[in-house]
Image (cartoon, rainbow, N blue to C red):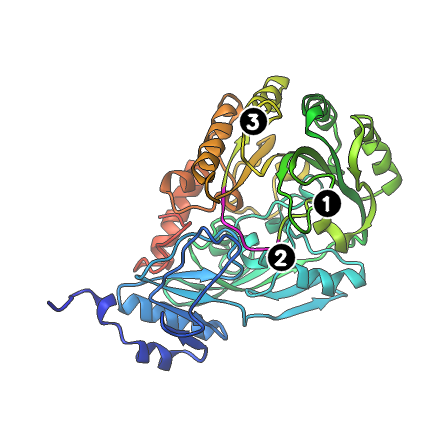
Amino acid sequence: MTSTRSVDQADIAALRRAVRGAVHRRTDPGYATVGFNVAVTAHPWAVVDVLDAADVGAVMGFASANDMTVSVWATGHGATGVDGRSILVRTTALDVCEIDPAAHTARIGAGVRWQQVLDAAAPLGLAPLCGSAPHVGVAGFLSGGGIGPLVRTVGASSDHVRSITVVTGGGVLKHTTPESNPELFWGLRGGKATLGIIVEVVVDLLPIAEIYGGAIYFDGADADAVAHRWRDWAVGLPREVSTSLALLRLPEMPGIPEPLAGRLSVAVRVAAAGDLAAAAGLVAPIRALGEPLLDGLGPMPYAQIGLIHADPTAPMPVTERGALLRELPDAAISALLAAAGPASSSPLTVVELRLLGGAFADEPRVRSALCHRRAAANLHTVGVLVPPIAEAVIAAAAHTVEAMTPWATGGELPNFAATADAARIRRCYDEDTYAWLSALAAQHDPHGVLDVGQVVR
């Protein structure tokens, strides 16, 4: 029988004629796409290494004409599955990274990772507001709002975006700012890929050359005392200090410090800008929490901000779950320890409480689709899906999130909710924001070309 679906009759030669970049089918050497989370499968109809915005627009038009969807891939962080009805756009070649030292801005292409921006800006005493992992792509991070190590001091990273150039689902190239296409500019910061594929951003760089930061690690046997005392210390902090607490079960493998490998440890992470001597005084009580396994707190160049969380860079199969919390009472700390602490059999690699508030809770100068700014903290769990514990890891993540339900807001943050599940995507937004994003999607993606993965529809 002959299929009547347009996607089954699509002409790969026509797509190759439409773009300047390379087009790969499944039998081509360049087809394989391996991102950070290898548990996410990508088996698209074709992979296109776009060279410019015109290529992205051509892919959108081809997909629309052939009943396909289009997904975007930079580093594979936050990726969701891609099937044979989709074309996967890889943005690696969109690699512009230009620093304007006078204007304190950076012009950044969609294929650029934060580390490249750090390397270019830090020698000039300028700080790009990256996340905890500098190997993450700039565009994807900002499209989800962006919660960095200095979130309580500077707010969301997306609040410091000057402009975004995007190709909408309708294949139209748009330059957006607070004054030009303001509704698109609003939705692109927090709405992930709902409205289009970002090809370039211009962001502010802050004059921060050095911070007081790092992490101090305690034995997991001391988790109860450390966690409760961290909570008492954290809730009274000024906005100059950002912090998180993480229960870590790190494997014995190359790259893991010997004192932390193969055991439960508790990390207290800190990042403070401004007066470093004052920050040292504010952080001093942390050292009184117990005898550390490792102490990495102190003044550090901003360029080394990735060392605070020391997130892994090697691809691995992971599952991530989380929830926003409205408060952090002692009972919540006790519940978390019961679910994932030393007396539990939790197989989760990371269970983190990240303190919010401060500048994150302020009304931004230019509003965006990033919601839930009044949350007190973010719970984030990471588990590695390897046999024979993969099912136990998934169950443990669900159990840990459920244990925190009494204090949860019911919301999540987009960059911590890499999913195509409609219910979880809805939890990333309040009702008004979700409705506006849906309306904008109908306007800018009338044929549903971007209706795949973590998008609002």
How far apart in space, not on screen, are marks 2 and 3 (Cα)?
A: 30 Å
Residue highlighted by disc 2? 135
- Graded by Cα atoms within 10 Å as few (under 14), some (14 to 19) or many (20 or more), the crowding at tag 2 reads many
Q: Position of residue 359 (x, y in %)?
A: 67, 39
Give the position of the N terminus as an image quadrant.
bottom left
Amino acid beneath label 2: His
Asked if the residues shown at circle 1 and circle 2 are in contact, with their CB atoms under 8 angstroms apart, the answer is no
- Residue at horizontal 41%, vertical 37%? 431
- Graded by Cα atoms within 10 Å as few (under 14), some (14 to 19) or many (20 or more), the crowding at tag 1 reads few
Residue highlighted by disc 1? 257
Q: Position of residue 309 (x, y in %)?
A: 68, 44
Of mark 1 and mark 2, the one earlier in the sequence is: 2
Indicate the quadrant where residue 212 lies.
top right
Magenta residues, as a range?
313-319
Residue 334 in view here = yes
Q: Position of residue 14 (x, y in %)?
A: 31, 79
> How many numbered marks, from 0 up?
3
Q: Is residue 152 magenta?
A: no
How far apart in space, not on screen, are marks 3 and 1 (Cα)?
A: 34 Å
